[in-house]
Image (cartoon, helix red, strand yellow):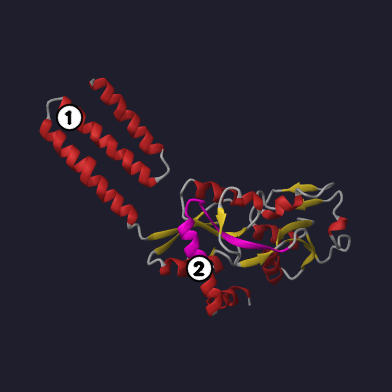
Amino acid sequence: MLNVFLIMLVLLALVTLEIKNLLNAVIVLGAFSLVLSLIFYYLHAPDVAIAEAAIGSGFTTIIFLLAIKKRGILIMLTYPHSRFFFYDQEGKPTGLDYDILFLFARTLDVELEVRTMETWRELIPQLLREKGDMIGAGLTVIDNHSQKINFSEGYFPTRVVLVTDSANKHIDSIKDLEGKIITAGANTSGYRALKMLTNIQIDTQFSNPNKILKAVSEGNILIAAIDLPEAIIGQLLYPNIKIIDHVTELRQYGYGMQKEKKELMKKLDVFLAEIKQNGTYEEIYNKYFH
């Protein structure tokens, strides 16, 4: 019997380490403590068994659950880029997405915590692994994303556009792309838009939109597909960049959230409607785009 208990102990420990959901992990950890108390009892140490059952399985588990419930933070997953999220000269988080979600966190009476990803493609997988509560990263609402996560109401219009150096006189529209190499960030809306075109080559050597725009301005990239807000910002930084055409129609950026968090999404949608109506959204928008 002792061997059975010891095997159960090891299995419960491994399961606790593997479970991504913090609440479920705490529950399994409570079961681990309960089995441990049975082992102590089996080894004729009833006083230790009672202590383990009372403190480990009972009191400690309750404390963990209360700590989770009162975690007091809203975790935003993001990717540092342009004016939707970036760090200022003092190293402080800022940007349109940050400001909006910071205010939203305050309405929930919690703090906003930021977790940045190194690449775009990490955002949705990390959200699904419950490493954060929502994505705030200028994420386009498209079917491919909506199959995996839910989106808030749109908060910023966008479309995929083509940009090139103003000195380039040979490409004026999407009709001139045949046989050309077009750059787009891997796993971005620009990349997916280009996949719908034929007789072109797609280059994904850059993932950061700022680096793409810089490379276009320096003549290292002939043409790139990028979101309109990024292109407009790029023109402010690099005046020689020009927008020549669009690949998609107007879409919206939205905040991504796990499909199970319906109540939190409802609160976010109500909040977005309120700040658009009371002028707060306009103030934040003007702070970064005017």
Is 270 in the magenta? yes
Q: Do the residues labelled 2 and 1 touch (CB within 8 Å)?
A: no
Is 41 in the magenta? no
On screen, residue 199 versus residue 252, left or right, reads right
Q: Which of 94 and 142 is in front in this view?
A: 142
Q: Residue at x 38, y 38 (%)?
A: 17
Q: Nearer the viewer, residue 284 or 253?
A: 253
Image coordinates of residue 178 in percent, x first then y, are 87, 51
Residue 50, above or below 252: above
Q: Report the mark closest to the observer, 2 or 1.
A: 2
Amino acid, disc 2:
Val
- Dot 2 or dot 1: first in sequence order is 1
Q: Which of 186 and 211 is in front in this view?
A: 186
Marks 2 and 1 sit apart, C-alpha to C-alpha, by: 53 Å
Q: Which residue is drawn at 74% across and 57% down?
A: 225
Amino acid, disc 1:
Phe
Disc 1 target residue:
40
Label 2: how many residues lie within 10 Å, few (<14), some (14-19) or many (20+)? few
Question: Magenta stretch?
Answer: 250-271
Displayed quadrant of residue 210: bottom right
Disc 2 target residue:
270
Q: Can you say which quadrant of the picture contains the N terminus?
A: top left
Image coordinates of residue 80 in percent, x first then y, are 56, 59
On screen, residue 253 versus residue 1, left or right, reads right
Q: Is mark 2 on a helix, strand or loop?
A: helix
Q: Nearer the viewer, residue 235 or 268?
A: 268
Label 1: how many residues lie within 10 Å, few (<14), some (14-19) or many (20+)? some
Q: Which residue is drawn at 55% across and 64% down?
A: 85
> Can you see residue 80?
no
> Can you see residue 287?
yes
Image coordinates of residue 134 in percent, x first then y, are 50, 56
